[in-house]
Image (cartoon, rainbow, N blue to C red):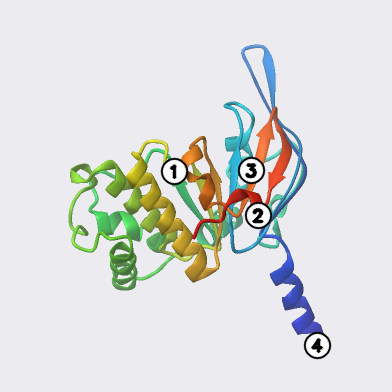
Amino acid sequence: MSALHAARAADAAAPAVRCRELTKSFTGAGATVHALRGIDLDVPRGGMTMLVGPSGCGKTTLISVIAGILTPDGGECVVLGTELSTLHGQRLLDFRGRSIGFIFQQFHLVPTLTVIENVTIPLIINGTPSPRARAAAAEIIAEVGLGDRGRELPGVLSGGEQQRVAIARALVHSPALVVCDEPTSALDHESGQMIMALLRRFVSLRQATIIIVTHDDRILPFADRIARMDDGRIVGIDTEATAGGQR
């Protein structure tokens, strides 16, 4: 095996996310909250990992560090082979824009833009010409089952439909990593299951890595791995044999 092939094989085998001794604290009102207390976590490439645990245990803080939204106080966070502490300013913004998609509990759609215009946002930010951006957006909108709703405003859509638009926006630029914070908690059971099936399909078709923070036990069977958190620490990992990995 050549050195180049060996390097590529090593990159493919490396986890999508590698956290070592991550710490993060917040101070306010005369008190300090230790949100992350020495987190060690590997997230394999090309699967769905869920973070579960009680409210306030640090789940959202952890994915915010992984996504480059928050800077840890200490430790190391390597995402897709890049140590985030080496990225600053525009370089960090560019990395996030190219490599990471975001899905939130609240859909964060721009109410004055049509469905297709909302979905083009990541592509436009990344410099994709408008005609190509609209074509790519139309394609993925059709994939999430909303091909006939592209010219409508978000306000006329149901909650499940708005979340599908948010998913299309998160996936349109084919990010290698997708970070989701409670993507189904505002949805009914049927809509939540549909959303998870869409995400599972994206994992299968594009070999993406998805990390989901959730309190929704109904979606746990979709996970390949479940990382359990408590008091700012990882306290257990369930692998596919116990997590479910529902296809």
Instruction: Please tell me whether mark 1 or mark 2 is closer to you in this view.
Output: 2
Q: What amino acid is at disc 2?
A: Ala
Vertical comparison of 37 with 88: above or below: above
Secondary structure beneath disc 4?
A: loop
Disc on the earlier residue, 4 or 3: 4
Relative to 94, residue 179 above or below: above
- Which secondary structure lies at badge 1? loop
Q: Which mark is residue 2?
A: 4
Q: Which residue is mark 2?
A: 241
Of residues 47 and 111, the one nearer the viewer is 47
The answer to whether 178 appears left or right of 155 in the picture is right
Earlier-in-chain disc, 1 versus 2: 1
- The residue where tag 1 is placed is 183
Q: CA distance from mark 1 to mark 2?
A: 24 Å
Separation (CA) of disc 4 from disc 3: 35 Å
**Residue type, numbered disc 1:** Pro
